[in-house]
């Protein structure tokens, strides 16, 4: 338990129906009693039972400045595991800020970013992976991304890692007994059993690592560059995906001279779209700078939608673009399929993950592109209710564990002895314990909660 009582606004900033100020810590009820007076004079805030609510006035000194509701939670049956009081006032920044200031004047201290969830973790209310899932849930834009975060929040990843730890711990216990107590005639583990257990753990960790990128796309979205020659239909595509006329569309080449940005939801994926200047040779200094930025966005993007004019023959600029997309997560969209086709798509097919004929003026093409993007990024293969890794910290720990297990398997295959196998299994267990937070350092814990918002 922490010694201080913290206060912060727990709801998003701006106008709304209500705003919630949360108190957590040993003096939560005492602080609440100083800033909240129940409408029923027979009710005592400091004696309120958990999971009850009272209506009353919020006060600062003798000045009542709002009416609202106080919700009470007794430790350990609260989000943080401490005494918690949530004060619901009318929405709006001024009232909520004044209520926080009143709480601080009454003895609370301002909460640091993520401090409520940090206290929940330190008080054993959730694992570190569940704590990280809280921010994933808050920031999720799509339904599948929210489902992935909810699965982790419900403990899916912790259970998955727990099962692998249990398997390795069983092996390690037998290995330790055989190595440390030879006089006890402990039976040696046979190679077949070692390979089976280690192989199963390696397979499970490989599955988590393999799905990391697709899961990250669902949770965080992906930067997507729309590239192509002038008048190929890039801005028309942006408008199609955005659902409104975000970019100017004209038959004049070079209309788009700078990068136009727009966030859109395409199926279950949030795309941060960048419509770029048409790629061609030009003597116009401003347009040339726009083209330089186009190439830069192409190099940085996690997804490339390369637009080609299907009504025209393939050009040198088209070939140069295709070569630049080779080996990248890129889809070729051969636009204007409503017109006679003169574009030979087979010439560029080897440079792209897929080539799709579309008409960027037709709504039906949006669904076709969404399905293609989901296939390319692997999000159509993700079970949103299964365990998944979130963030580079978890990925790095899982990768270290997987590599250590691979080392144990190599030791078995190479006949290096059970001592070598034991060392590798120890390394794998350490990595998995760091992933779940059981042996995470203070620096790792600080890093996790630095990205949280105040009030959560």
Image (tube, rainbow, N blue to C red):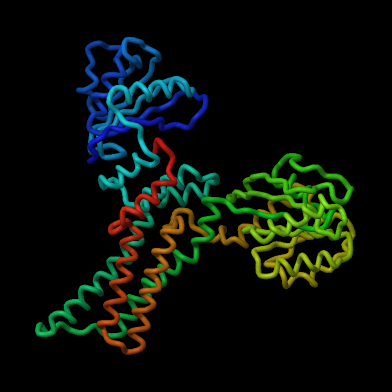
Q: Residue at x 29, y 15 (%)?
A: 38
Q: Residue furthest bottom?
A: 415
Q: Quadrant of residue 120?
A: top left
x, y percent for residue 163: 31, 64
x, y percent for residue 151: 41, 51
Q: Residue at x 42, y 64 (%)?
A: 396
x, y percent for residue 41: 25, 11
Is 405 on the left or on the right of 318, as rendered? left
Camera sees residue 24 = yes
Is 280 on the left or on the right of 391, as rendered? right
Q: Is residue 86 above or below residue 290?
A: above
x, y percent for residue 366: 71, 50
Q: Nearer the viewer, residue 409 or 147?
A: 409
Q: Residue at x 17, y 84 (%)?
A: 187
Q: Quadrant of the C terminus?
A: top left
Q: Nearer the viewer, residue 86 or 290?
A: 290
Q: Nearer the viewer, residue 143 or 317?
A: 317
Q: Quadrant of the N terminus?
A: top left
Is 387 on the left or on the right of 83, as rendered? right
Q: Is residue 135 above or below residue 280?
A: above
């Amino acid at each position: 338990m922490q010694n201080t009582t913290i206060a912060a606004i727990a709801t998003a900033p701006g106008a709304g129906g209500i705003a919630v100020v949360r108190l957590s810590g040993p003096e939560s009820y005492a602080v609440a009693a100083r800033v909240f007076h129940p409408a029923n004079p027979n009710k005592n805030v400091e004696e309120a039972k958990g999971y009850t609510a009272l209506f009353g006035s919020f006060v600062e000194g003798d000045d009542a400045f709002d009416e609202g509701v106080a919700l009470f939670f007794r430790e350990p049956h609260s989000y943080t595991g401490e005494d918690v009081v949530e004060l619901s006032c009318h929405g709006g920044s001024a009232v909520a800020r004044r209520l926080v200031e009143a709480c601080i004047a009454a003895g609370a201290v301002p909460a640091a970013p993520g401090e409520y969830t940090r206290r929940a973790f330190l008080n054993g209310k959730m694992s570190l992976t569940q704590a990280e899932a809280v921010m994933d849930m808050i920031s999720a834009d799509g339904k599948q991304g929210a489902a992935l975060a909810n699965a982790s929040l419900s403990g899916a990843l912790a259970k998955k890692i727990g099962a692998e730890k249990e398997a390795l711990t069983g092996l390690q216990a037998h290995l330790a007994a055989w190595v440390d107590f030879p006089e006890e005639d402990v039976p040696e583990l046979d190679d077949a059993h070692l390979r089976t257990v280690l192989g199963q753990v390696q397979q499970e960790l490989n599955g988590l690592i393999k799905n990391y990128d697709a899961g990250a796309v669902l949770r965080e979205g992906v930067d997507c560059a729309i590239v192509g020659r002038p008048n190929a239909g890039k801005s028309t595509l942006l408008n199609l995906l955005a659902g409104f006329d975000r970019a100017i569309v004209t038959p004049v080449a070079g209309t788009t001279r700078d990068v136009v940005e727009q966030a859109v939801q395409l199926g279950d994926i949030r795309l941060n779209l960048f419509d770029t200047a048409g790629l061609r040779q030009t003597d116009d200094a401003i347009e040339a700078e726009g083209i330089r930025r186009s190439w830069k966005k192409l190099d940085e993007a996690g997804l490339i939608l390369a637009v080609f004019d299907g009504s025209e023959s393939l050009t040198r600029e088209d070939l140069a673009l295709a070569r630049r997309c080779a080996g990248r997560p890129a889809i070729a969209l051969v636009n204007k399929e409503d017109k006679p086709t003169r574009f030979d798509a087979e010439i560029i097919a080897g440079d792209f993950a897929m080539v799709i004929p579309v008409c960027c003026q037709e709504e039906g093409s949006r669904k076709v592109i969404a399905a293609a993007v989901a296939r390319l990024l692997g999000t159509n293969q993700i079970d949103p209710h299964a365990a998944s890794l979130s963030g580079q910290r978890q990925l790095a720990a899982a990768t270290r564990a997987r590599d250590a297990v691979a080392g144990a398997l190599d030791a078995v295959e190479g006949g290096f002895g059970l001592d070598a196998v034991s060392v590798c299994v120890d390394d794998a267990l350490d990595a998995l314990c760091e992933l779940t937070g059981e042996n995470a350092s203070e620096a790792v814990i600080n890093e996790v909660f630095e990205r949280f918002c105040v009030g959560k």
